[in-house]
Amino acid sequence: MSLQPDLPEEVIALAAVAEAPRMTRRSFWTRAWRELKHAPVTAWIGLLVVAIYIFAAVFAPLIAPYGETALVGDAYEPWGDQFLLGTDQLGRDMLSRLIFGARNTVGIAFLTTIFAFLIGGTLGLLSATLGGWVDQVLGRAVDVLMAIPQLIFALVLLSIVGTSIVNLIIIIAILDSTRVYRLSRAVAMNVVVLDFVEAAKLQGEKLTWVISREILPNILPPLVAEFGLRFCFVFLTISALSFLGLGIQPPLADWGSMVHDNATLINYGDVTPLLPAGAIALLTVGVNFIVDWFLHRASGLKE
Amino acid sequence: MNAILRTVLQRLALGVVTLFVVSALISASVALLPGDFAKAILGQAATPETVAAFEKQVGLDRGPVERYIGWIGGVLHGDFGTSYANRDGYTRTVVSLIAPRLKNTLFLASMAAIVAVPLALILGMLAALYRNTIFDRLINVATLTAISSPEFFIAYILVLFLVARAHLFPALSTVDEDTTFGEHIYRCALPALTLLLVILAHMMRMTRAAIINLLSSPYIEMSRLKGIAPRRIILRHALPNAWAPIANVIAVNLAYLIVGVVVVEVVFVYPGIGQLMVDAVSRRDLPVVQGCALVFAATYILLNLAADIVAIVTNPRLLHPR
């Protein structure tokens, strides 16, 4: 088929047709890049921070100068050529512990958030879809769990089952799933009453189909934003527990306990113990920046 | 007025019921969850006989319902049980451990709250009124950074600059019964300042959001279109409807103070109930943990109840739901 110069309409139409598959093929990356170009500076900072943390967590053994638990020098050695950020209270390299901490602290918080979403999201969607006594029972149970401050309840449960990483993940995931339950139930409630859900139910689709194919795709944006915020809360809670000596246990490198173990240095005006605390704060700020931008975009689309 | 009174009484009753359910939950977790207390407390070398004797002594051999009734009955008479620690010869009751520390914690929390609440409300309202200006953006980034930081980060930054570099305050906030009031305030200054910064940020963000939400409602737009002066809009139209959300913001943040207090007390070695609880958890001293948890939960429920009641008595619409 040859394009004649005296048929401009056809040319335009053909060009559009030829262009269409290419657009859909590249659309995700093109759109993502276009979004990023218009993203505010804060979102860029957030993305950069998260990327650096992921890199450190994945390649920790390659970039860390020493092993995670290796005793390589004297206790509390100052910053220098051999130990870039000095050593900790047992003589382990501070920089290496910081890098491995990205893997442990962030990894455990991420895992916990995923569990919290699996539990809370599933129950919230079930509650909204089924209604009736399921909704009532789950709703009241969540009310009771939320009547106790989260950190306090976590402390009670930890004193009963003892401190270990598995216990920590399960306890925080369950306590945090109450918030996820509330949100996913609330947003799913708005979708459940719509006609296409009704149609799918009348068509005889199974419950899992209705939930995963009809409801879930329509409530994804608020859940994604919530995932970011939840991660921050979980991350801060686990860090606080570790700082109190009740979270991630030694010898695993963890930012919360690193602050606690080296805190005496601060009284001598040394900033080293603040580095892990700063690492926690920086990641939380970064994730918050991204969530802010995402929420702004999501609400902008609706208007 | 009658209707208001009835709703308030209903809320109070609901609060009492919640408190009982929470106490049952705290007690039930012990029965339902796996935990080898006797072994954890007596050590791995304990013989079955000593384990059985210990369980009998602290009442772990009884059924969960019986144990809960015994415990809650004691609590209602002001008896929270006896600590597991120091069992040989000299035992301490949970009340004698909690009471003096609760006083210290309340002292610290009120010190932070008295300054934080008015300051946060004023700054939050200013941010809402001058929204999308440089002032608002700066506040937004600053408060976001503050709420993203763990409490111990803020605490140790203050220690670094105010204790290690400037030598203005003592590093540890140790107090006892002989500490004078002025001395107590001086020693509490750093932990109170930490708590202040943390809840200030939370509270400002929430106040700003609540006020912006209010200012976008149709009746405010109506009064603006009528040409009423901005100050009159705020004072006569917005403020009467703002009390409920503001009370809610204050209650949520004072409840947040409860959690913040645990970490801050540990940082500054301040003899409060938060530190007591953390110590008890690591020693697995269950009666003390339960007692502390009940005190924290009761405070939390009371604060939320207070916010509810303020919302009811300041908002006539809540009294006549359609």
Image (cartoon, coloured by chain):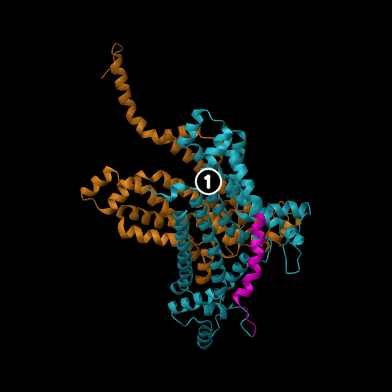
Chain colours: A orange, B cyan
User: Is residue B91 a member of the stretch shown in magenta?
Assistant: yes
Asked where in the image residue B97 lies, by quadrant, the reply is bottom right
Tell me, yes or no, if residue B100 can be seen here. Answer: yes
Tell me, yes or no, if residue B142 can be seen here. Answer: no
**Which residue is farthest bottom?**
B49
Residue B188: x and y, percent? 71, 59
Residue B45 vs residue B29, the one in the foreground: B29
Chain of the residue displaying label 1: A
User: Is residue B254 a member of the stretch shown in magenta?
Assistant: no
Taking the image as shown, residue B176 lies to the left or right of residue B263, namely right
Q: Residue at x 53, y 82 (%)?
A: B58
Q: Residue at x 64, y 56 (%)?
A: B152
Helix, strand or loop under label 1 = helix
Residue A78: x and y, percent? 73, 55
**Which residue is farthest front?**
B2
In the displayed structure, A261 sits above or below B245; it is: below
**Which residue is farthest left?**
A203
Tag 1 residue = A287
Taking the image as shown, residue A69 lies to the left or right of residue A225, namely right
In the displayed structure, B13 sits above or below B243; it is: below
Category of crowding for the residue at label 1, using alpha-carbon neighbours closer than 10 angstroms: few (below 14), some (14–19), many (at least 20): many
Taking the image as shown, residue B176 lies to the left or right of residue A107, namely right
Q: What range is drawn magenta here?
A: B89-112
Residue B163: x and y, percent? 75, 55
Residue type marked 1: Val
Residue A11 vs residue B152, the one in the foreground: B152
Residue A7: x and y, percent? 28, 13
Give the main secondary structure of the magenta stretch. Answer: helix
